[in-house]
Amino acid sequence: MKTEITSAFIKRYRSIVRDAMLPFQWRVLNDEADITIARERKNDAGIPTEKSHALENFRIAAGRTEGEFYGMVFQDSDVYKWLEAAAYCLMQGDDPALKKKTEYVVDLIADAQEDDGYLDTFFTIKEPKHKYKRLVESHELYCAGHFMEAAVAYYEATGNQKVMETAKKLADHIDDCFGPEKGKIHGYDGHEEVEIGLLRMYHLLGEEKYLKLAEYFLLERGRHPGFFLDQVKNDDMTPVFPGMEYAPATYFQDHVPFVEAEAAAGHAVRQMYLCTAMADLAATTGNEEVKAACERLWKDITNRQMYITGGVGATVNGESFTFDYDLPNDTMYCETCAAVAMVFFSRQMLRMEDSADYADVMERSFYNCALAGMALDGEHFFYVNPLEVDPEKSDKDPGKSHVKPVRPSWLGCACCPPNLARLIASIDEYVYMVKGMDVYVNLYMASSMSDGDIRVIQETDYPYSGSIKLRVVNDGADARVALRIPGWCEKYTISAPYELKNGYAFVKCPNGETQITLDLEMKPERNYANAKVSEDAGLTAVSYGPLVYCLEGVDNGKYLHDLLLPSEEEIKTHREDDLPGGVVTLTADGIREDSPDDALYSRKKKTRTLQELKWVPYFSWGNRGENEMHVWVRES
Amino acid sequence: MKTEITSAFIKRYRSIVRDAMLPFQWRVLNDEADITIARERKNDAGIPTEKSHALENFRIAAGRTEGEFYGMVFQDSDVYKWLEAAAYCLMQGDDPALKKKTEYVVDLIADAQEDDGYLDTFFTIKEPKHKYKRLVESHELYCAGHFMEAAVAYYEATGNQKVMETAKKLADHIDDCFGPEKGKIHGYDGHEEVEIGLLRMYHLLGEEKYLKLAEYFLLERGRHPGFFLDQVKNDDMTPVFPGMEYAPATYFQDHVPFVEAEAAAGHAVRQMYLCTAMADLAATTGNEEVKAACERLWKDITNRQMYITGGVGATVNGESFTFDYDLPNDTMYCETCAAVAMVFFSRQMLRMEDSADYADVMERSFYNCALAGMALDGEHFFYVNPLEVDPEKSDKDPGKSHVKPVRPSWLGCACCPPNLARLIASIDEYVYMVKGMDVYVNLYMASSMSDGDIRVIQETDYPYSGSIKLRVVNDGADARVALRIPGWCEKYTISAPYELKNGYAFVKCPNGETQITLDLEMKPERNYANAKVSEDAGLTAVSYGPLVYCLEGVDNGKYLHDLLLPSEEEIKTHREDDLPGGVVTLTADGIREDSPDDALYSRKKKTRTLQELKWVPYFSWGNRGENEMHVWVRES
């Protein structure tokens, strides 16, 4: 399947990634960008913020230069994710300057690899005696997984042999060291990711042992209680994250085997990477027990633990899932990486089962929480994506210091920016899905795809319009196009006969050309959270099509909590091309409450005055300076 | 002045203190109570929870037995506060058994004192080489202050000479070690308290050097930046609280001299103890600069940083004040000790200036946040007093693990229970105030007082009734009674002519007997927070007289956030003697919202059904098992 994106909305993002984000990240990785690196929260003095040093670590490990390792223990993964994103850009068209950089990186990584295949600059440079001895914190397999993902993408983009040789050598080395056999390590990494990388290696190469190794890591997890702690107790290295071995087993999804898990738990990114790999495994091997667990966790997350923006992770403590219906708007985590991983997980669930529900969440997480992770200039990034922010509280309340009101230019723990870059650069892979003779349209996005005898040309102004024109050119046998009917849409018309199943409208496309027009009624909508969500009681979140909207101080003044949207008031749409990115904004006649005097507590009711309320899409918030923001708005 | 309390409400509390709390605490201090000691929060593994060991520490320091020190570095203060509370009980009437225990304690403390006057069992037993060398964390002067307070109270109650000799020897030793003179330590304790103790010693003994020493500690604070850190850097003791020397200077109120402070900051109990001592100093010496600073901080706290319950401390991080109008209801601290200290501060402000405003806050903090610190059985205590709690969130959200839904039987850091005990046991000292020929009635409470030629007999069912009858018997020259008109009261009648000034109604009481009836209109009231308080937007807190009310799950079911009080609905009062303590409860016809289905997010508006709402006084919450609680309720 080959897909080309023509959507102006997405092309703009992709050009940001190619022209701004990747060059900027390149300068950062080379310590050439003049930036202030932000701490994630006020009390994380342990996070290095002087520089990235990521490529220099590789140069030192490769023996090209001398020096000390600097950065997070998983600093290597920043380079790998950059390389993966660059690979997707190269798939979209020639870019000799970018290609040269990537070739430099591929050579450098190969040089940094040890003779036996081991690859991790932290341990090669700093702690060579402690390889694989502290998996609770070492992130060695996590980094390896990211390299494998990058290698697969880069190989697919360029056919570069060296990157695949390096990746195979690394995967083989890990296979030599881990597994059920005697003499191997019976354990797994504290941070899931290598499983995703190994499965991608398997999908590309068909090498059975990579599938088996991924399966080993996945199915063994939660069956070796005490493994992390025992390793650390038997090792004398200075800890990277002191005390991490005492974190609750849920943090690592090590409290229970995945197939027995009832609910998402622990560190959200880890949980989502685990879910992604598990759904891939189930889709690949047909493991019914794993499939059932994936469906169980999917329901738990999307029905009880997910924000309306598609973000997950309700607390900064352990950057974790908490429990059903616990969805605070101002202290949550909603890490960009976790939203990106929700998109990964959704896609794997779709592979397993063609239900539009999965695509709905994929769309929700992508267009809202994930895209919000990057500024419209491509050079500033959120780690945490709040649904409510007050700059003064972020500044002065230590419990909210992780919630930034504006995107910093880089992060000491820089996992998010390149993760988002690789998703945006590869979003074409998420639009269509082919199963047998059915072409699924999972995302609406002006684009064209071809697969075998079939071509689909999609024309639309989505996400700002629900009008979609499809031209299907079929040079082969009878086929169908499956049009996803979005969960957000209540009324729609399709110009051709269709059969509805699992949220998809199946339209027959015989040999020849078929024209289909899909009209999704798109209008401003009020959304209400379940009554069990205490934080959203009395509040409404406004959406327009797939986009969640928010109020910002720059449009609505201070004290957004004092604004009310009357319950029957009409919400109007406006196209505003002069706002960054050109967006559809919403307005309504609203109310502002105020106090009659300065008293802290008073018997007097608050005064009410009329004020127009103005919403912008959530993904675009925080691009016009520091100000308050609310997704959930009081309704009167 | 001598006061006797006849109020059934207060006598009940005082008998709890005398008959339940003090005997229970005695067993705890002797490690004889069969209790589970609660951690304050989940991550405070450093807090000792095996036992109290407080009296055993004294026995070891006294050489009566052998062993190791156990407990918090300030464990001694638990004994001192118990002794102080016991002293107040002894003032109210003979109690030979209690007296015997107190004499044992006084002898024991004297024995534990070193020859030069030094007194602190942690350092005597465990770290004798490090006395006064780590004031950032040692709490040596903090403990000393509590002993001085206890000694003054116990001496006043019993005339015991030994306790006063011990206290003087200790105060003299501190005076030898600290001060501006060459060779003395130019610094102060990390936790204010000794200043209060020294001033009480001065008030009792008239010994000028105690006043001077208190003044030195108070006025020097904030003028020795780096003192805490320098001490620790020059000392090699294993830290008690590792890293405390790097806490922001605001935590210790060391960021600025008090006279220059614009706002309350840092650890709330420390700030309130500092304010209390400062107001005492200003009232005692007439220092205008200190007085102005006290008034500034008073306004800052009560107009912008105080909860409606009279609690202070908006965050668990550093148990601290945060900033103006930052008053989260579910993550706050509102430590019982801080509310107790608000009562202390109010009383000292009243000494300085007769404004009913101070007495209003004294009443608010006492009847609401402070009294809530103790269960109605006198054997369970809150450290943290939330305005909103959900047991599931306390259990599962690490960011709310400090918020307990029921009172534990004891606390690893046990500062609060004896602090509340000493306040309740001495509450008679807060009811009246004599200035010249004016007798101020600051608290309404059935009681009688006599001072010189004047006697006042107060009859009332306050706080459940606003009807107050005063009989003033004056055997001397013309005098006045100043009746406080509470801030919560909008309509009142007084049976005698009066002159209104600073919130007091002054009624002339010539020689002879004067009968005065004061009728304060007491009815259920809705209170609204300032519009700048985001957490209270759209919410109302119901009060009745001085009491703040709350909804509890046991009366109103789960999901209190889904309940609404219609804006014009009448709130009815009920006397319920079968509820613990016998209280006035409130009810109103309210509304419950619910979701039409299980969806996490829905376009459908919530359903509304009628439900009677029932409120109980805030001080009485959490006495009927684990359940949700809300002070602030949605208004429709």
Image (cartoon, coloured by chain):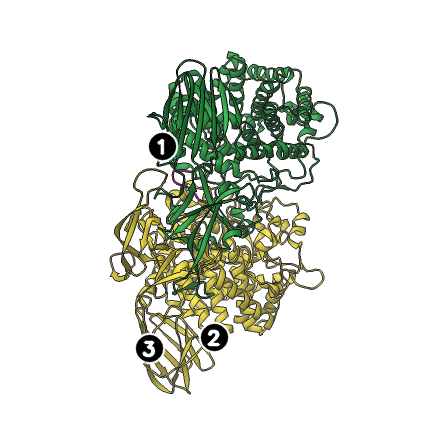
Chain colours: A green, B yellow
The residue pinned by badge 1 equals: A493
In percent of width and height, residue B296 lies at 55, 67
Q: Amino acid at mark 1?
A: Thr
- Camera-side residue of A535 and A613: A613
The residue pinned by badge 3 equals: B493
State if disc 3 and disc 1 touch (CB < 8 Å): no
Question: Pointer 2: residues within 10 angstroms few (<14), some, or many (20+)?
Answer: many
The residue pinned by badge 2 equals: B354
The tag earlier along the polypeptide, 2 or 3, is: 2
- Residue B493: name its quadrant: bottom left
In percent of width and height, residue A612 lies at 45, 54
Q: Which mark is residue A554?
A: none
- Residue B503: name its quadrant: bottom left
Question: Of tags 2 and 1, which is closer to the observer?
Answer: 1
In percent of width and height, residue B249 lies at 61, 54
Region of the chain picked out in magenta, as a range = A323-328
- Camera-side residue of B275 and B466: B466
SS at circle 1: strand
Q: Identify the chain of the residue marked 1, using the numbered disc in the image.
A: A
Q: Quadrant of the N terminus of chain B?
A: bottom left
Question: Of tags 2 and 3, which is closer to the observer?
Answer: 3
Q: Is residue A160 magenta?
A: no
Q: CA distance from mark 2 to mark 3?
A: 21 Å
Question: Of tags 1 and 3, which is closer to the observer?
Answer: 1
